[in-house]
Amino acid sequence: MNINSFSWPRLQDNLKNFSFAFPAIIIFSIFYIYPFFDIFRLSFHQWNGITPSMKYVGLQNFRELMGDAVWWQAMGHAAYITLIALTFQNILAFALALACDREIRMRRFYRVVFFIPPVLSEVVVGLIWQWILYAGMQDGQHIGLLNYWLTQTGLPQLAHNWLSDPKTALTCIAVVHCWKGFGWGFIMLLAGLQTIDRQLYEAARVDGANSWKLFTNVTVPMMVPVMLVVVILTVLGSMQVFVLVLSMVGQGLGYHTEVPVTRILAAMTGTNRFGYACAMGVNFGVILIMVSVAFKSLSGRLKQA
Amino acid sequence: MKKAVGFALCLMLLGGCGQRKEDLNTVTLWHWMTDRQKAFEELARRYEETTGIKVKIDLYAPSDAYTQRVVASAQSHVLPDIYGILDKKEIFASFIESGFVADLTEVFHKDDAAWEKSLFAKALDVNRFSEGNIYKVKPGIYGVPIDVTNIQMLYNKKLLAKAGIKNPPRTFQELLDAGQALKRVGIAGLVSGWGEIWMIDCFASNYAFNIMGEEKVMATYRGEVPYTDPDWIKVFNIFRELRDKGVLAEGIVTKPNKYAEQDFALERAAFAFNGSWCVNVYGDMNQKLEYGAMLPPPVNPNRPMRIWGGAGSSFVVNNASPRKDKAVAFLKWLTEKDQQAFLAGETKNLPSNREALASIPAILSQFAGVMDQTTHPTVWPYNEDAVVTEKFDKGIQSIIIGEKTPEEVAREVQEVKERELKKTKQ
């Protein structure tokens, strides 16, 4: 640094500029940076969340976590929900976005309807679906809407205890999660579709491209950046699902419906192991960051291609 | 102009940093009981009329959210004057150890222990730390019970009659037979909120006490008896038998208690396992419901059935509060006969004051009649490690869904127990 280049007016100017950003930096530090480092610090301690004293245990929480079969099982369940969301939810969202991007009747109405599930509270959605999938009977009749409907339409053999059977419970949660979440993807993909220059389609048509060619050679390449954003948000949202799980199956079904966040909650409030819960949080955060970075680099490569 | 605005802003910021003047005449109470908000508000109004002290009643529900709020407030030292600790005794002890709870022993013992004597001993025990307690808390009373509760089985008289069952079952075998009789006529048997694992724990512990007695249960918690012991297998087996004989209602393992209460109140199941608070809930849902309360039918007729009970809801006083004495005075007033009778009448809960029992409904009397048979983890000399308890309860869920045998679950729970014991020794 050249000492001759120093000038008071410039320093004053810089300080003045910095003072405008200062409140935001303070808020960001208090509400984002500090909690992040505190969680990291707590993950090296044994603490019940109440007592003023805590015991430093080094990496013990992380070592225990590596061997915690239930934690990795929960991670697997979140991955399963994410996989269903990435495929079923996003394909549905894209198909509906494509449909609404065309000149169809009542497309504004559809846009509103498809965006209703995402704005509903997850607890409400969970409780409504719990009622739909309910397995109980009264006076020989199913009370749950799905089982009642199956019985009425001549398919009583398909009536099932959907949420209390380990074979179907997690899939039911995943499907409801997709139902609730596809609206976000739909809106983002629709916005992306509407930014594609219509002249590209016209030019391709003049060159003799059919609908399929238009889709594969114009729509898909132009939508790659939006699709990647949708994919990253889907992964982050699906891996962190938990309100739906709690409202649909509570703490039930052994460990079959556990997801990472329910495990973190159980460690924090069920077994009062704050340090261990923080270690879970750090581990989970690192995994999510790694996944996001992987998708980001994939996005870069696809853009170059 | 700019300088003036800047100066004013700085003054406001500095003013914000200053200490707020304490309002010493307003006591703040945090609770989680949605059904009692109106009654509390009414009592607070009456108290203000009588004493001039304002009591601010803040409701934070559901109880999980309330617990999180209390823990977070304790961490940041912003607890209200009066609050409740809805957690294990170990956590209650941590609150005391951290100086968040006032020791009320002296106040209870004043005037020949008049306040203490007016309340159910079982209810006070939940808030009491005795001499030589394992938590190393100074012996004394640290909380005020505002009602008492116990958790029993309920039976629907009409549905039992429909299945040809004349009397509610008195033995476990009779319960299994009743479940089968109900199944034959298409009525679900037992419903309970076993999607909330503490309720499974409660049911299992009732039978553990009945099958092997308190001493052996405590010996297990101390690590002296393994969960693979035949008596524990018998406890796990109860759930297998209930499942195999079709006594359990569909989806019981994923049912929150609110839904289970709805099922029983709307006559979708003949039996329920629920606490005395249900009288209020069922009354709201179906006023024509004809039901009675009974102890869970014992497996071992030679040992009495012990059920969970004691203080239903208790409040503690914030030790750091400048309004500590006023908070204690309000709680004392709240547990007096008239206020307790009002609360019992309004909310259909069992009063903690013995003298207020006279005017409670018949069904509540059935609950009150077995208070002597109640016990609770908070009064036991030892408590199981929470990690082991979670494995235990989840294991029972696995038995109910037919995934594991009692022996497998016992083995798995014992493995976790040994691991946790090893950790404690380290």
Image (cartoon, coloured by chain):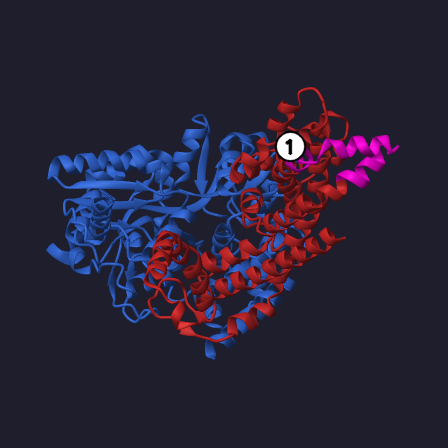
Chain colours: A red, B blue
- Residue B145 placement (x, y as % from top left): 28, 49
Viewer-proximal residue among A116 and B183: A116
- Per the picture, the main secondary structure of the magenta-coloured stretch is helix
Q: Which chain carries label 1?
A: B
Work out whether B307 lies above or below B191. below
Viewer-proximal residue among B412 and B247: B412
Total marks shown come to 1
Q: Quadrant of the N terminus of chain B?
A: top left
Work out whether A1 lies above or below B171. below
Q: Residue furthest top?
A: A105
- Residue B229 placement (x, y as % from top left): 57, 68
Work out whether B281 lies above or below B126. above
> Which residue was labeled with disc 1?
B185
- Would residue A234 be found to the left or right of residue B279 on screen? right
Residue sitting at x 51%, y 65%: A279
- Would residue A58 be found to the left or right of residue A130 on screen? left
- Residue B215 placement (x, y as % from top left): 43, 67
Residue sitting at x 81%, y 35%: A214
Number of other residues with Cα within 10 Å of mark 1, as a class: few under 14, some 14 to 19, many 20 or more: some
Viewer-proximal residue among B289 and B413: B413
Q: What element carries label 1?
A: loop
Q: What residue type is labelled 1?
A: Val
Q: In which quarter of the image is residue B53?
A: top left
Tell me the magenta residue range: A190-219
Viewer-proximal residue among A24 and B164: A24
